[in-house]
Amino acid sequence: MSVAVQRLVAAVDLGSTAVTGVIGEVTGDGRSWGLRVLGVGREPSHGMRRGVIRDFEATVLAVRKAVSDAERIAGLEVGTLDVGVAGELVAQRISHGVASVLGSEIRTADLARVNDVASNVSFGHDQELLHAIAHDYRVDGQPGYADPIGMAGERLEAEVFLVTARSSALNHLRRAVEKAGWRVGEFVLEPLAAALAVLTPEEREAGVVMIEFGGGSTSVAIFQGGKLRHAASLRFAGGHVTSDLVHGLQVTQADAERLKVSYGAAYEPLVPEVEVVELPGGAGQPARHSPRRLIAHIMHMRLQEVAEMAIDEVARAGWSMAGLPGGVVISGGGAEAPGMVELVRDVFASPVRTGVPAAGLRGLVDRVASPGYAVPVGLALHSARQVALGGGFGAGGRTSPAMDRVFAPVKRWLQDFF
């Protein structure tokens, strides 16, 4: 297969239960771009916990296997991977910047400069900037401008949403990817990337809550006006559901996971009361039988708690569902459980749908057409968008540290706008 190096993108999602690699080719241009999925690899892993490496060697082996499998399917090799970041190592804040307009009207360079002023703040010990997302601009003191390019003015102000991450944790992630055999291109906030995979432009503009039900954590993100407005990570996720089943059914962790996948449901009323499932017996003990509805009850109680924590997070961030008419979009492996839409709809009292990567994709679409692939596909789409807009260099080669220093501010400014 022949793919131009600068049109090749690759990404890896280091999840708590699996590591997923995606390789693709950028299609189209800056006006109409997309991604042709060339290779996908997924490897079970327990080396990560809430976005932080807990077992370094296990993480390295999972990255090596997942990305190598993606390369084998694609029939080509990549040199650079964009890496998703989420969980407990991420923080956020609002910052303001002021700059003079250098010409007769506001130009792209003026926006980049005022964003850079707002981003040039002290983040404290062990923190580094991931994203700077401009929420609002003021021109000569007048607020409410999302895109003031072309306007006349002398003073430009910006309100910028800054996302940072722990430098030490990022260094550990970088070392793991490099030991596996690749270079890290960019670290990308997972909800920002996943939004490209599962949210429509209309939802991002009107206002929507995106909930990613992962194995080790649950991410909550709010989008409005086309921008990321808030992001948070909840401590409870799919792994806690499995643990509840272990205790409630008196089975092993492996059996609990199997029962969850085969017979589980997130919404208890969906399961008929008459259904019975066989539970494996313990050492020297015969198999037992249990109402399937008991499994659903255990799952329902925990997942309802997680959904309630998510709506509490929305309120804590200063939003209400009345101001987010796009409702809720759920993704992640946990979103695949039967009844998740019904459960989340009950809690939020808003429209809810399951987010499945599809828009703008070609190639091996069937391999990624499930909510559990929202983050890895979103990371690849994020890279593809940078390349299409001229702010990325592709995954097949390497850039020098000098080039990174020159282009990093421009790339960050480009990549953080929808």
Image (tube, helix red, strand yellow):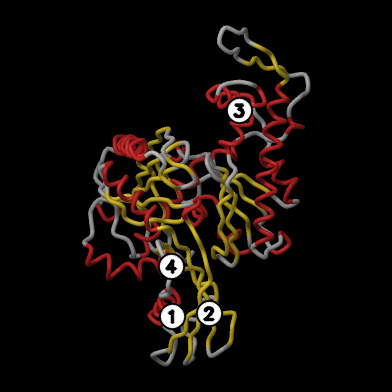
Q: Is residue 337 left or right of residue 1?
A: right
- Residue at (58% x, 28% y) in the render: 261
Earlier residue among tags 2 and 1: 1
Label 1 SS: helix
Cα distance in 3D space between marks 2 and 1: 10 Å
Earlier residue among tags 4 and 3: 4
Cα distance in 3D space between marks 1 and 4: 21 Å
Which of the two discs, 4 and 3, sits closer to the camera?
4
Q: Residues within 10 Å of mark 1 (few under 14, many from 20)?
A: many
Badge 1 is on which residue? Answer: 114
From this view, report whether residue 156 is shown above or below residue 187.
below
Cα distance in 3D space between marks 4 and 3: 42 Å
- Please report contact status of discs 2 and 1: CB closer than 8 Å, yes or no: yes
- Tell me the kind of residue under disc 3: Lys
Residue 64: percent from left, percent from top: 31, 37
Earlier residue among tags 2 and 3: 2
Cα distance in 3D space between marks 2 and 3: 48 Å
- Please report contact status of discs 4 and 2: CB closer than 8 Å, yes or no: no
